Image: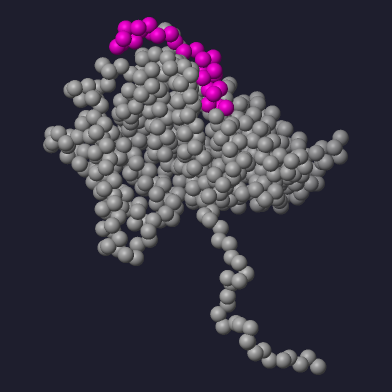
Amino acid sequence: MTAFIIENMAPIMFVSLILFLILGYPVAFALSAVGLGFAFLSIELGLFGENFLRALPDRVYGTMSNETLLAIPFFTFMGLVLQRSGMAEDLIDTVGQLFGPVRGGLAYAVIFVGALLAATTGVVAASVISMSLIALPIMLRYGYDRYLATGVIMASGTLAQTIPPSIILIVLADQFGQSVGDVYKGALVPALLLVVLYAAYVFGLTMLKPDAAPPIPKEARRLNEADGTVGLKSLAAILIFIALAIFGFIRLLQALFPGLPEMDTVIYGAALGTIAGYAVALANRNLKLGLLSRMAEAVVIVLVPPLALIFLVLGTIFLGVATPTEGGAMGAAGALIMAIGRRRLSFGMLSEAIDATARLSTFVMFILIGSRVFALTFYGVNGHEWVEHLLLSLPGGAIGFLIIVNLIVFLLGFFLDFFEIAFILVPLLAPAAQALGIDLVWFAVMLAVNLQTSYLTPPFGFALFFMRSATPAKAYTDTVTRRRIEGIRTIDLYRATLAFIILQLVMIGFLVAFPQLVTHYKGPEVQYEDSEIEIPGLGDDLDLPELDFN
């Protein structure tokens, strides 16, 4: 029996951890308990000596001193401040009015706002709950299919998992030992493509079932002009003005700073031109100039601040001006400035945001420390070799590995939180992926999209819980139409997620088939012909002295 335990210590240890998690023990303590328990057992069985555990303090200290992980509290704080400052409500209301006249317009608005909230708040709970409380009653009021309405809200809220500055991307970058900036760049195209897939699904559904997503009636379009028009000409005019302002500022910067890199010039010019448009909209509102329609004025005033914040955070990271941690710090400062500008920053709100940030950050750090304890013992019993051999022996090479791993991660997402999967499973997958020659940034982005499904899969999908907490379970009478609206059951939420889970799985298939969707972050590879390589000073007529070795 002892010989069997020694020979199979790694799989026994892994199964024991799964058993602890199934029994409901906290993840951080389960990891530490299994790691230390099997460490003492391994010492008794002679698998390694007591001195082996001296590496544990260094591992824990290395985790605590990791500057990359400092970005997590910054981005969390930024998201919580923005969520409590009412930005989500303003975005949903204004964008809903803009797209409302179109069939499926409210669903498009939810997707668009979900993407914007993901790029600014990065918090799934804030996005899902905000859109559930604001957009869902309006969608049900005007006859939207309940499965489409709830499904699109939950799926759009989970975009915070893949659109930078996603916290899970930071965690995956750290676990794979990759640059957070590279992971952000690699995730951008797949995240935007996922937004397009959601919108394409809504469009297809409205073509097949027009009654599933009707336009909102004219009497509900409160941003229309007095004559009932939307004011699109005015909106087009301000957009043209912003485009001309951007072009003008770019040319001005080129003239004033000829040595400034072209990309920097374009981005700074875009920022200045957008601010100019925002200033015009504010002047129109405050001075009653009458230059813009109500729709154009509202769209510019509501959209520019979050877009500016996205530039402040992601633009500086992509340009290499700031590290992710520095970008997170600037984002947190920008969120406070936006809250002050909206006159919604209070001591109570600030205290709640700090408290929630501290709780989440502590939760992440405890899991990470627990995973370090578990990993040390697991490596001590050669568990990494067992996992690597197991994964490398899968049929199909790299593609077979990707398919099997994605299937495992998808199934684990039904029962485990994405943090748990990232901290427990990912460190075991990285060596095998490297051995197969898989780009780790590509692999990280693929897993991030996969982990996004864990928010939607029952029974433990967090988006389902957030949606359940914000939706009426019993029938109610709408306050505007006085129409009776049936409540939404939990089984309705499960059914609503099916189409969007399939879309996310399709996105994973795209990533497996087209790695360049992610690997574009490397830039174009430069190819050289032999004839193009010249070394100055060396030529065919070079006279070398003869060497005599006799």
* 277 inside magenta stretch: no
Considering depth in this image, is 229 or 444 the residue closer to the camera?
229
* 481 inside magenta stretch: yes
* Residue 246 drawn above or below residue 506: below
* Residue 74 drawn above or below residue 226: below
Residue 26 can be seen in this image: no
Considering depth in this image, is 128 or 81 the residue closer to the camera?
128
Seen at 34% across and 27% down, the residue is: 99
* Residue 453 drawn above or below residue 512: above
Question: Which corner quadrant of the image does residue 303 belong to?
Answer: top left
Magenta part of the protein: which range? 476-502
* Residue 125 drawn above or below residue 371: above
Q: Quadrant of the N terminus?
A: top right
- Judged left or right of residue 510, residue 256 is left
Q: x, y percentage for residue 416?
A: 60, 30
Considering depth in this image, is 407 or 374 the residue closer to the camera?
407
Q: x, y percentage for residue 320?
A: 43, 55
Seen at 24% across and 44% down, the residue is: 241
- Judged left or right of residue 249, residue 30 is right
Q: x, y percentage for residue 255?
A: 27, 62
Seen at 65% across and 90% down, the residue is: 543
Q: Quadrant of the C terminus?
A: bottom right
